[in-house]
Image (tube, helix red, strand yellow):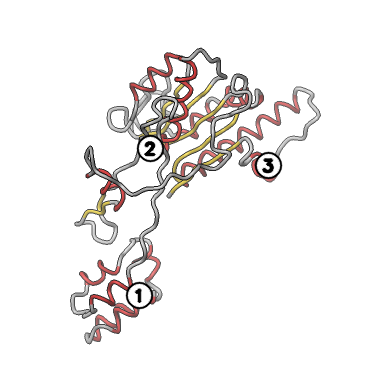
Amino acid sequence: MQDILTLAEATQDATIKTELQALSGAKYTAEISHKRVSVLDLLERFPSVSLPFDAFLSLLPPMRVRQYSISSSPLKDASRATLTYSLLSEPSLANPSLTHTGVASTYLSTLTAGDKVHLSVRPSHPAFHLPTTSPETTPIILVAAGSGIAPFRGFIQERAAQIAAGRKLAKAVLYFGCRHPEIDDIYREEFDHWEGMGAVSVRRAYSRHPHDRHDHPTIGDPNGTGNGRKYVQDILWEEREEVIRLWNAGAKFYVCGSRNLAEGVKGAVLRIAMEMYREKKEAGENVEELDEQGALRWFDGIRNERYAMDVFD
């Protein structure tokens, strides 16, 4: 808001000054924040604003450090690490006639073999690692959408290398969400190969395709007309019996993707937990059924123990 007032002070046009002052006040949320309008957008919109270049630079926010999950395993190749990212290029909310491109993703997309990049490697959260104790008997449930597949490609690549070396591992199920099987079902051939090895079982959700390639019709749309859309949380709920069976066998649960994905998956997991405890109660176990508040307390108890998240905006 203060930046907009600075622009207002830099114009002699009373009409523009009044409009900028309004944008810094009641209109700020709808016209600036939600549309992600930058100082440069406003200068282009109001050319009568005469802002010195050094003042313009002082209004620019510092660039955030970008963090990407390594999408490979050193067991495959200790000298090579890969990144998986989404290239952001879409109409600008501030001006739909222009294209908004991601700073870091666009830069990465221009790199070629031999280019040098300044980066640092940081360890992931201690909970966000494959089981190191009893991996032979600890199943894993992986949930991702889009570029959130990155760490799980590394997980499964590592499991495939272990299996190829003769190691026995517990079951791994990957729930992966993307838009269309012909557009962004990334690493399909690799995962098909790893699935054939027994390193993972992949369940895909295509949000903009009427049905999966295999045998999963769209939720609410059994005839495949395209009227229903399916997300990973829908498949989790649909396959809750298997999720419960794996959880009762000691499974660890991992989620990677956007905050919207994380919230959707959390909602499905809470519903599954309530059903799981209801079934335990009906089977005569000495447990209490969970209501919504009880499910939330249960969820808080498993976070960073058996439920790990890597969430980005």
Image side of residue 140 versus residue 100, left or right: right
Indicate the position of residue 90 as horizontal and vertical percent values: 26, 49
Q: Which residue is mark 2?
A: 146
Q: Does residue 212 appear anywhere in the picture?
A: yes
Q: CA gap, disc 2 to disc 1?
A: 35 Å
Helix, strand or loop under label 3: helix
In the figure, 121 relative to 8: above or below? above
Q: Is residue 37 or residue 249 the one in the foreground?
A: 249
Q: Write down the quadrant of residue 10 in the picture.
A: bottom left
Circle number at residue 178:
none
How many marks the image carries: the answer is 3
Contact (Cβ within 8 Å) of mark 3 with mark 2: no
Residue in view at x 34 percent, y 34 percent: 179
Image side of residue 236 versus residue 304, left or right: left
Indicate the position of residue 51 as horizontal and vertical percent values: 24, 79
Indicate the position of residue 261 as horizontal and vertical percent values: 47, 42
Q: Is residue 236 or residue 81 the one in the foreground?
A: 81
For disc 1, the neighbor class at 10 Å (few under 14, some 14 to 19, many from 20) is: some
Contact (Cβ within 8 Å) of mark 2 with mark 1: no
Choose the circle earlier in sequence order: 3 or 2.
2
Residue in view at x 38 percent, y 77 percent: 2
Circle number at residue 301:
3
Circle number at residue 3:
1
Q: Write down the quadrant of residue 44 in the picture.
A: bottom left
In the figure, 303 relative to 52: above or below? above
Residue in view at x 39 percent, y 57 percent: 64
Helix, strand or loop under label 1: helix
For disc 2, the neighbor class at 10 Å (few under 14, some 14 to 19, many from 20) is: some
Q: CA gap, disc 3 to disc 2?
A: 28 Å
Choose the circle earlier in sequence order: 1 or 3.
1
